[in-house]
Amino acid sequence: MMNSKLFSIFCIFLIATLPSAHAFSVLGHELNAGWDDVAALGIGGLAVGAIAVTAGAPVLVAAGIGIGGAIAVDYAYRWATGKDVEESAAVTGAVKTNVTDEEYVNGSYVYEELAGYRQYSEESAAKDIAEIKDKLESGIGTYSFKTSGTLSDVSVSMKGPDKIYGFSAFPVQLKFDEALTGSESSYVKIESVKIYLVDSDGVKWNERTYSDDIKLQEESNDYPDAIEEYILNFTMKAPDPYIGKAKSQVTNAPNREILQELLGAEVKEFELVVEIDGYAKLYKEESGYKLDPITGLEVWKTWEEYDKTITIDTKITTLEAWDRIHNGVYYVDGADGSLPTKFVNEVTPIAYSSYANGATSNIIGRVWASPVHCYNSSAQYKFILVGQPGNLEPVPVTIEDDYRALVLKLRDDGVATIASETPGNFHDMAVHNGVTTSLNYLKDDSTEAFETYFIVIADVDDDIDSALPVWCIIQPRISVIDNVKYSLSEEFKEEILELLSDGSISDSDTERITEIIEISENSLKEKQYVAEIESEKYEDNEKARNAILNSLEDYEKAFEYYEKAKNTDDPEEVKVYTYLAGDIYEPAGDYWREAAEKYNLGLDDQGDALASNAEKLESLAAEYEPSLWFTAGSTISEWWDQFKSGFGIGDVPDTVLIIVVVIVLVCGAAIVIKVL
């Protein structure tokens, strides 16, 4: 009884202290309160507190529960009706609510998002190469091995790279130490050292021989110039059945199948084998009395005499060389496909993502190119490559090359021909090298697509034996697109900005903006019609089918935003809506349509590159669109209005209905609690 009285006093206090219809703060969140908020807070607090009292809770606990209930009910009410936001474009819960004039005309934000990496400069190129080198840098470590045959009076150790990538040349260091015992005159002579690789199929590769005599002997007073240890360095190379094919792609007519084979080539497992031939000539010490020729007396003497010769015929096979070797395929991130044709006048190359393979520990590369790649035009390319002689230390080497940059035209008869090419060489690849060239994409009736490749053949020379040939291939993730025009031209956008420049929209402004949008819609309808016709030929290709459906969906969204732009008198909304239609959803639809074509041709990687750009644009659109929570709240508000209309109480204020519903709930809960 006492609890009920105290709670009644608390309720009177709560009602008396309810905020007026002005701004107030809940948990640091400022709200613009109205009488509906007052009702929601009051009824929520009374209802929840009453339930707590009825359940037998202490009055202070009930009061606390009442306050919490008041806040919770009001928050729920404001969320459901969409009130809990500022009355501006932010009412949607979008991350961005306006478009700058510069972005509206120039699309700088779109450019930055799609360019993805960085524009070319000497500094950025050097930084990129340094990052790749750091990932591929190798040191040298000791290799374990097994020995067969005869190895007498000499110990052998072997060192090699701790990491080696692809079909690369790499250093091997053999160290010979004399292990003689007994006579100082004994010595070991290594007459031949042969080293080669044996792959998992038992095939021998890259045999190299050192045939100069190596004499090892313990240093002593009688032999002050004796050599006790000797280090022999070799340059070896991973098994490479592809070197002939790689050379043919630089010197002969290119073959697309071979180029693709090179990009996916994998290194076979192998171990190193060293064969050592020579002998150990051993002397022994003898002691006894001998006649001294000077004194004529017998004296005790120690002398050396030949004992025996032991043949050295040893084979050493590594146990873990393969654990140090990795395939040479690597991927470098960057821009994909092509930027929209609206950026065709941008001339500064951007870094493109690319695939590479080959002698990755010896040669690395990066590709920059024009932002836009469209049919019947040319594109500027900058290929940056550098040799990595540091990965062959302690063996000093030089790396010299020949290269070929080429664009292949893929025809509808399945044949790939040269569309454009640039041959040349960098000479010494130990330094940062770059070649700038222009490659074109001239299209005819038989052309289906284009692909770009850069191939390098280089010789790694250690001045010990014949130079080892290595290769490198790079394919930038570029996809050539149609030279499409966009429905909302730059001139139209500049005109719209001029009409909106005074911050308001007059009737004449609305009329002209509507004319511009309708012209744009007519242009967009042509694209939509083409996409609908093309969709019929993609029925049997799921990826192409999905892409063309995405294209049609994005075109439809562009239409929706054009319609919104025609039906608003808010200047900022006109900008945002036409921006979303013309700069975001229409280009996204174009990307999906191009991707569908590439998928249908079996060029899935080019399709993926274009699809990736479409998704990036759709992500940009999401920054300007209503949040999921706002959309859900708006949906609930619509359902609530429909619910009221269905019962013929559409004109009854929400506040009254909330009070009635809460009272019913409170009474029902109280009855249930009493019964229990």
Image (cartoon, grey):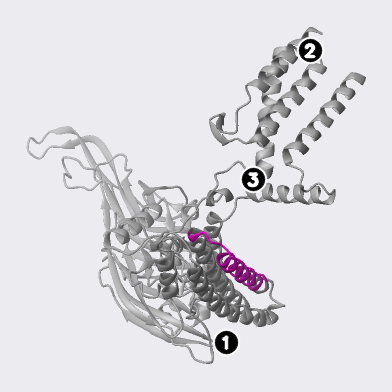
Secondary structure type for disc 3: loop
Secondary structure type for disc 1: loop
Residue drawn at (17%, 47%) of the image: 225
Rendered location of residue 321, percent (x, y): 47, 54
Q: How many neighbours does mark 2 have within 10 angstroms: few (below 14), some (14-19), or many (20 or more)?
A: some
Q: In which quarter of the image is the N terminus?
A: top right
- Can you see residue 360? no
Contact? badges 2 and 1 (CB < 8 Å): no
The residue type indicated by label 1 comes to Gly
> How far is the residue under mark 2 from the one under mark 1?
89 Å
- The residue tagged 3 is 82
Q: Which of marks 3 and 1 is in front?
A: 3
The residue type indicated by label 3 comes to Gly
- The residue tagged 2 is 4
* Pick the front one: 603 or 309: 603
> How far is the residue under mark 3 from the one under mark 1?
58 Å
- Whichever of callouts 2 and 1 sits on the residue coming sooner in the sequence is 2
The question of residue 386 being in magenta is answered with no
The question of residue 567 being in magenta is answered with yes
Q: Quadrant of residue 379?
A: bottom left
- Can you see residue 63? yes
Rendered location of residue 468, percent (x, y): 35, 69
Secondary structure type for disc 2: helix
The segment highlighted magenta reads 546-571
* Left or right position of 546 against 479: right
Position of 422 relative to 100 (above/below): below
- The residue tagged 1 is 414
